Amino acid sequence: MSKLITLKEAISKYVNDGDTVYAAGFTHLIPFAAGHEIIRQKKRDLVLARATPDLIYDQMVAAGCARKVIFSYMGNPGVGSLRIVRTALEKGQLEWEEYSHFGMITRLQAGASGLPFLPMNQTGAESLENANPLIKRIPDPYGGKDVIVVPALNPDVAIVHVQRADAQGNAHLWGIIGEQKEAAFAAKKVILTAEEIVDESVIRSDPNRTMIPGIIVDAVCHVPYACHPSYAQGYYDRDNEFYLQWDKVSESPEATQKYLEEWVYGVQDRNEYWEKLGAETHKRLEVKALMSKPINYGEY
């Protein structure tokens, strides 16, 4: 049965006020379009979890969507702080939990495995243990040194963007692989956005690339260019200029709200957003084809 619906419908149906939302993707395949739709629908009191909040959570906090952030490393990659989230934290306007990158992934792995927690090796980040009481040390039951344990993370909703998927939600992704698989398996509901919707035969032609199986997906949304200003390997490049521009925009609450009014509330969907960016930006973000070598799965 097809799970294809619009992104607007998916956010309306599966993201509720107060939910814990995990927008997956590590520098790559970040689901900005879904974040913008959450802003447009004025979802409130969300717990935003992500292993590098990136600009999307800066924008969602600026729009008043969040009451808490759960994260590992927070910044505008290659530029500096996430000014809006940092200011909200410093003013006590936002609850927060911080982990190491591996701590966040371990939390998702525990959630995906149906376990209450998972152990980790000790790290040099003892200050995180002092700041976050959910990071604990327990004795190794086999007699070794103490281990760090972190609690499972089971988001109400995981949002994952992929290069291509079929209508049932079986999805291929390639390039930098982040925590998409762990987040999807740990979540109660999964919204999948895709650059392309393809026939099931395309997915079956390369089963090892199927990182997300349709059995865990609740909604499939065809959303080309959903990652901008992030990137989708093989489809369009990272918009480094935008990341630099956002650092200036986010210095001012007035400039930030003006951006949201024009680029989020002021457009109906991702298609209109992409067209508004204009031909010059489209050209700048084009990527040349660089095909991988074919592999032979054999036929029986």
Image (cartoon, helix red, strand yellow):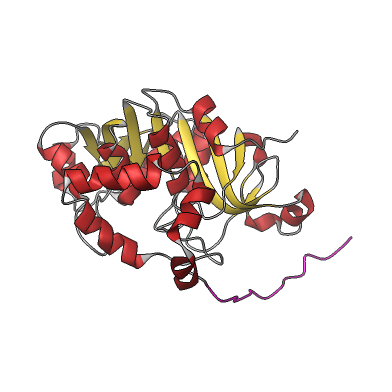
Residue 191 seen in this snapshot: yes
Q: State which quarter of the image contains the C terminus.
A: bottom right
Of the pair 141 and 258, the residue shown nearer to us: 258
Relative horizontal placement of residue 42, taking residue 9 as reference (left or right)? left
Relative horizontal placement of residue 180, taking residue 3 as reference (left or right)? left
Of the pair 51 and 60, the residue shown nearer to us: 60
Residue 78: % across, % down: 26, 64
Q: In percent of the image, x 25 and y 50: which residue is there?
A: 74
* Res 46 quadrant in image: top left
- What secondary structure characterizes most of the magenta part? loop
Of the pair 296 and 33, the residue shown nearer to us: 33
Residue 2: % across, % down: 72, 36
State which region is magenta: 287-300
Instruction: Tell me if residue 191 comes above or below residue 45 in the rendering.
Output: below
Residue 145 seen in this snapshot: no
Give yes or no for residue 102 being in the magenta stretch.
no
Relative horizontal placement of residue 201, taking residue 141 as reference (left or right)? right
* Res 60 quadrant in image: top left
Q: In percent of the image, x 10 and y 39: which residue is there?
A: 90
